Structures are given as structure tokens and as C-alpha cells.
Image (cartoon, grey):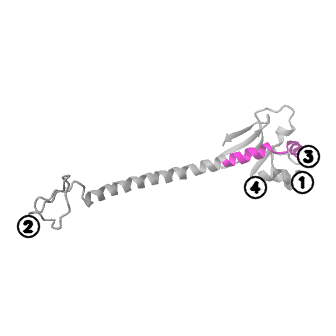
């Protein structure tokens, strides 16, 4: 007759058995699929939370990057302005206003200087389309305060100013 089958290998591991109801079959030491499913759900929730946090951080940093790059463009444009031509244009503008008995404004926009023919637009291309104004009083004054803003370029949350002493500063509104 047949000898009873041994369900154990030589190294005391369970061998595969065609009859799973066989007596003496060892119990599984691994989690069933239900336990693994719970672990996968927790991992997915954690990964989802991390993804949402990364997306929120990315969205919050975009305006700062844009603001910083805009500041760099404005600063570069202010440094490259032909100041001698700009001073001559503002003086001619003020002189023409006085000659026609018109009020000389405190500031004049770069667009107005270009439109009036006082200034060629080729040197102002970096500031074209921006709200940039020049202080007429700072150009025409003999004793100018070094901390006075000579050229002001408006942006969304701040202004970038070329000061009378030649420095460039960001000024909050």
C-alpha cells in the first residue's frame, strides 16, 4: 500500500500539496491579500498627499520666480538706459512746456517723451510697454537729494527706481 505523503521538505518548509485540506498542512506566515490591500491603500494615500503638497508648493513659487525675473529685466533695462539722452529729453520737454506757458508736471512718462519726439524709442525698447516715469524735478534741480527716485518703473506689487545717486532700489507701494 501507499505510504502516507510527507508534506514537509528536508529543510522543514512546506511542500506543495494537491489537496489543500490535508491534515498537518502548515499555516501561511505571509499576510493574505486583504492585509496587503490595506497597506497599498495607505501607501496610495501618503503618495497622494505628498503629490498635493508638491503641487501646492510649485504653484506658490511660480509668482515669486516671475517677480524675480521681472525685477532682473527691469534692473538690466535701467542700467542700460542712455542717461545723457534721457536728461536732454526731459530738459527739452520742460523747456517746451515753459515756453508755451503750460504747467510742467512733476513726472513725465517715457512713452510721452517718445511720442513727443524728445526721445528715440530705440534706447527704450527694454522699457516699452511698462509704466515708467522720469522725475522732471530731479533732472532740473541743482541740489538733488541722492535718495530721490529719478526713474520709477511700476510693477504689480512694487516699483523699481533708479535713484539720483545711480543705485537701483525696489520700493514697495
Label 4 crowd bin: few (<14), some (14–19), many (20+), radius 10 Å: few
Residue at the image point whose x is 79% and y is 36% from the top? 166
Label 2 crowd bin: few (<14), some (14–19), many (20+), radius 10 Å: few
The N terminus: image quadrant: bottom left
User: Which of the marked residues, 1 or 2, is nearer the chain's N terminus?
Assistant: 2
Residue 129 numbered mark, or none: 4
Residue at the image point whose x is 58% and y is 51% from the top? 62
**CA separation in Å, label 1 and label 2:** 114 Å
What residue is disc 2 on?
Answer: 2
- Where disc 4 sits, the SS reads loop
- Where disc 1 sits, the SS reads loop
Instruction: Report the magenta residues as a range.
Output: 69-97
Label 3 crowd bin: few (<14), some (14–19), many (20+), radius 10 Å: some
Residue 117 numbered mark, or none: 1
Please state if 45 lies on the left or on the right of 171 as rendered. left
Please state if 111 lies on the left or on the right of 34 as rendered. right
Q: Position of residue 111 (x, y in %)?
A: 81, 53
Residue 83 numbered mark, or none: none
User: Which of the marked residues, 3 or 2, is nearer the chain's N terminus?
Assistant: 2
**CA separation in Å, label 4 and label 2:** 98 Å
* Viewer-closest of 110 and 99: 110
- Where disc 3 sits, the SS reads helix
What residue is disc 3 on?
Answer: 92
Amino acid at each position: 500500500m501507499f505510504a502516507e505523503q510527507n508534506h514537509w521538505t528536508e529543510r522543514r518548509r512546506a511542500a506543495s500539496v494537491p489537496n489543500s485540506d490535508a491534515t498537518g498542512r502548515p499555516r501561511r506566515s505571509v499576510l493574505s491579500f486583504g492585509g496587503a490591500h490595506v497597506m497599498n491603500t495607505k501607501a496610495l494615500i501618503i503618495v497622494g498627499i505628498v503629490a498635493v503638497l508638491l503641487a501646492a508648493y510649485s504653484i506658490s513659487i511660480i509668482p515669486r520666480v516671475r517677480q524675480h525675473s521681472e525685477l532682473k529685466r527691469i534692473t538690466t533695462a535701467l542700467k542700460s538706459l542712455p542717461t545723457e539722452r534721457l536728461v536732454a529729453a526731459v530738459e527739452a520737454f520742460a523747456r517746451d512746456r515753459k515756453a508755451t506757458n503750460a504747467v510742467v508736471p512733476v513726472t513725465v512718462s517715457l512713452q510721452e517723451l517718445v511720442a513727443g519726439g524728445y526721445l528715440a524709442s530705440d534706447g527704450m525698447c527694454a522699457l516699452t510697454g511698462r509704466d515708467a516715469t522720469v522725475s522732471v524735478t530731479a533732472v532740473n534741480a541743482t541740489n538733488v537729494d541722492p535718495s530721490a527716485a529719478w526713474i520709477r518703473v511700476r510693477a504689480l506689487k512694487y516699483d523699481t527706481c533708479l535713484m539720483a545717486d545711480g543705485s537701483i532700489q525696489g520700493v514697495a507701494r
